[in-house]
Image (tube, rainbow, N blue to C red):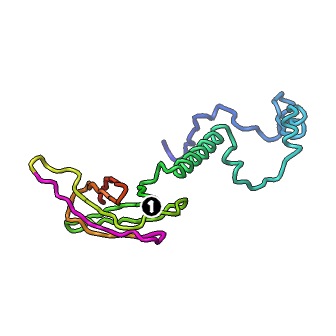
Amino acid sequence: MTDNEEVSRPNANYNLSKPDGKDARAEGELIFYYNRENRLKKAPQSVRDLYANAKPYRFSLIRPLIADKRRAILFFTILIMCAFIFLFSKMGYFDSSYSLEGNKIDITAAKHEGVTLIIMKKARKKDVTDAYSGAVGIAVSPAVIGDNEEMPVFFHRVFFTLEPSEEYRFVVPFNDPDLLMVLQTEKSTLKARIKSK
């Protein structure tokens, strides 16, 4: 191919554009016009009402959450689950505290350098006026021991006073992750199993 030759297009035989000066109506071609008013006249009444009564947008927190059926079901499921969690926590199902003669006792344990620190928090229950005050004997031992080993027991004593809340801390010489603890007053006994962190 030389420079003087003209490169032919593969679609040169096709008429791709309307030539200047031709009238489309004279040749029988279709002419499309977009007329909104004519289109809305032929539309159903519900569509005409949408365009006639266009409301301004107002901000809402709830409307996007319940915009369609799936979102509404999810939203109400979350609300119901939150209500159940609130009720169960009020009924005490998620509470890990113990009760000892009108006192609410929370016990936690933490390991540190071969020993375990036990933190015991005592609070008087709200509806009880005469909660126990006095000496409380405490016995702590590991939960799991071997067959041939003697069960080591650590004894301690604390004194509950008439204060509405108190905190007691003491160290036991066990490095086990599970501990058994027994609290004993003159009238009652409380058994607890503690997992140290």
Q: Residue at x 13, y 49 (%)?
A: 146
Residue 144 versus residue 72: which sits nearer the camera? 144
Quadrant holding the C terminus: bottom left
Task: Specify the segment rendered in magenta.
Answer: 149-166
Image height of 190 relative to 119, above or below: above
- In this rendering, the count of numbered labels is 1
Q: Which residue is drawn at 68% across and 44% down?
A: 66
The residue identified by callout 1 is 103
Q: How crowded is mark 1: few (under 14 residues within 10 Å), some or many (20 or more)?
A: many
- In the displayed structure, does residue 142 sit left or right of residue 68? left
The residue sitting at the top extreme is 28
- In the displayed structure, does residue 96 sit left or right of residue 184? right
Residue 40 lies in quadrant: top right
Residue 101 in the image, given as x and y percentages of width and height: 43, 58
Q: Which residue is drawn at 33% across and 68% down?
A: 158
Residue 16 in the image, given as x and y percentages of width and height: 69, 36
Amino acid type at circle 1 is: Asn
Tell me if residue 16 can be seen.
Answer: yes
- In the displayed structure, does residue 99 sit left or right of residue 45? left
Residue 59 in the image, given as x and y percentages of width and height: 74, 56
